Image (tube, rainbow, N blue to C red):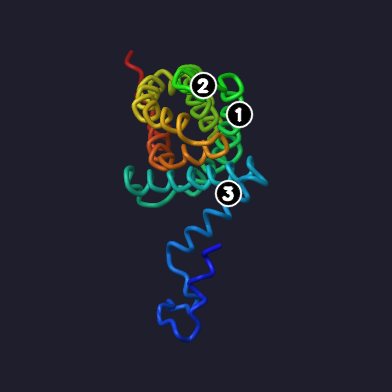
């Protein structure tokens, strides 16, 4: 509604940007957010899947370039991690939040705590182990899944609790259901960097 005001000054306004549009960063951000809410309402699963896939891909790139300091980017790995977000993580989170809010619809504090407990102590362990399993299988290394889970699952789960328990408490308590996946995406990029790094750590050799 107020987004067009910046371009209404005509010749008398000298506030137009280099492109002549008169749109400032705030106006563009507001427009983008309204468009996001619109497509989220009309195509919720697709929107969440695409957003999650993009964040997965970016997280993997950051993991490779910043933390692993790879001399060249493994494009196939980034593609797999992007597709994981697109076809598994995004749709799974959408479905899970729907189920969770049907199981425990109460907006009161005890309802929030019940949803948080189910999310972190029932869903999260299955979700994390599924991510490791899918990635290793997609990379043609399904035989490494048991060793990977034994080596990294516990540490990853504990880190997950440290990050997500406080954040999801606020997400479940304050954010409307249709925006909860978007809310989780607020810190998902940083989590994706960690998950990608952990998922691609080499298995330590067995001590005989």
Marks 1/2 in contact by CB < 8 Å: the verdict is no
How packed mark 1 is, by other alpha carbons closer than 10 Å (few <14, some 14-19, many 20 or more), is some
Q: Earlier in the sequence, mark 3 or mark 2?
A: 3
How packed mark 2 is, by other alpha carbons closer than 10 Å (few <14, some 14-19, many 20 or more), is some
Q: Earlier in the sequence, mark 1 or mark 2?
A: 1
- Depth-wise, is mark 3 or mark 2 nearer the camera? 3
Seen from this angle, which residue lies furthest bottom? Answer: 11
Residue topped by disc 1: 98
Place of residue 103 in the rendered image (x, y in percent of width and height, measured from the top left)? 59, 19
Between residue 163 and residue 200, name the one nearer to us: 163
Q: CA distance from mark 3 to mark 2?
A: 27 Å
Place of residue 38 in the rendered image (x, y in percent of width and height, measured from the top left)? 62, 51
Between residue 106 and residue 179, name the one nearer to us: 106
Location of residue 94 (image quadrant): top right
Q: Judge left or right: residue 129 versus residue 39.
A: left
Q: Judge left or right: residue 117 versus residue 98.
A: left
Residue topped by disc 3: 37
Q: Secondary structure at mark 2?
A: helix
Q: Earlier in the sequence, mark 1 or mark 3?
A: 3
Residue topped by disc 2: 123
Task: Answer yes or no: is residue 45 visible.
Answer: yes
Q: Secondary structure at mark 3?
A: helix
Compared with residue 1, is residue 145 higher up or lower down, i.e. above or below? above
Marks 1/3 in contact by CB < 8 Å: the verdict is no
Residue occupying the point 43% across, 44% down:
59
């Amino acid at each position: 509604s107020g987004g067009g005001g910046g371009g209404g000054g005509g010749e008398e306004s000298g506030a137009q940007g280099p492109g002549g549009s008169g749109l400032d960063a705030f106006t563009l951000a507001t427009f983008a957010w309204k468009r996001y809410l619109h497509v989220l309402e009309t195509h919720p699963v697709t929107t969440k899947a695409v957003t999650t896939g993009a964040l997965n891909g970016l997280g993997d790139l950051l993991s490779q370039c910043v933390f692993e300091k790879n001399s060249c980017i493994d494009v196939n790995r980034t593609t797999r991690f992007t597709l994981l977000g697109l076809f598994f993580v995004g749709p799974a989170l959408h479905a899970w939040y729907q189920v969770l809010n049907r199981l425990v619809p109460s907006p009161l504090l005890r309802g929030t705590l019940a949803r948080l407990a189910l999310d972190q102590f029932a869903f999260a362990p299955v979700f994390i182990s599924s991510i490791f399993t899918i990635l290793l299988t997609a990379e043609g290394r399904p035989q490494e899944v048991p060793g990977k889970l034994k080596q990294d699952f516990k540490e990853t789960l504990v880190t997950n609790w440290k990050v997500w328990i406080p954040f999801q408490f606020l997400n479940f308590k304050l954010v409307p259901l249709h925006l909860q996946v978007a809310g989780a995406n607020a810190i998902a990029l940083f989590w994706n960097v960690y998950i990608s790094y952990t998922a691609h750590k080499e298995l330590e050799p067995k001590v005989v």
